[in-house]
Image: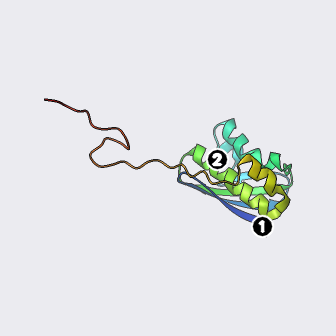
Amino acid sequence: MVKNIAIGTGRRKTAVARVFLREGSGKIVVNGKDIKDYFSSDAQVRLVHQPLLVTSNDNKFDILINVCGGGLNGQAAACLHGLSRALTQVDPNCRPSLKANGYLTRDSRMVERKKYGQRGARRRFQFSKR
């Protein structure tokens, strides 16, 4: 059995990603599929790769990611956050460069809740004078 080196949890909106780092050749698997098969756009794939490029750990680790909740963009950002946290566990010297790029900060923006008596979070029902 292959031993995990580090585990990181990343979150964005309602998406949660668990990232497992192992010694390897740079293969990234998301929910049992290759990363290019799971994420539809190249921008999402590049977003997940960013922490590896910044810390120059491109082909050192095999990465296994379990992600659930949210949409694909939120899931990609959650993967980035989890991968950054896992990389800091493996090598604490990576922390300054990841922090400078903002990859260790949890993006706390969430969808505003719908209020009663309104059509949405801020949108009101149409006013009728008569």
Q: Which residue is mark 2?
A: 76
Foreground mark, 2 or 1, reads 2
Q: Label 1, secondary structure: give it.
A: loop
Counting from the top left corner in percent of width and height, residue 89 is at 78, 64
From this view, report whether residue 93 is shown above or below residue 56. below
Q: CA distance from mark 2 to mark 1?
A: 21 Å
- Placement of 117 over or under 94, stated as above or below: above
Q: Residue 19's quadrant in the figure?
A: bottom right
Is 126 above or below relative to 75? Answer: above
For the view shown, which residue lies furthest in the left direction?
A: 130
Is any part of residue 42 visible from this angle?
A: yes
Residue at screen point 75% across, 46% down: 49
| Among the two numbered marks 2 and 1 on one chain, the one whose residue lies closer to the N terminus | 1
Residue under numbered circle 1 = 4
Q: Residue at x 70, y 62 (%)?
A: 8
Q: Residues within 10 Å of mark 2 (few under 14, many from 20)?
A: many
Residue kind at label 2, given as amino acid type: Ala
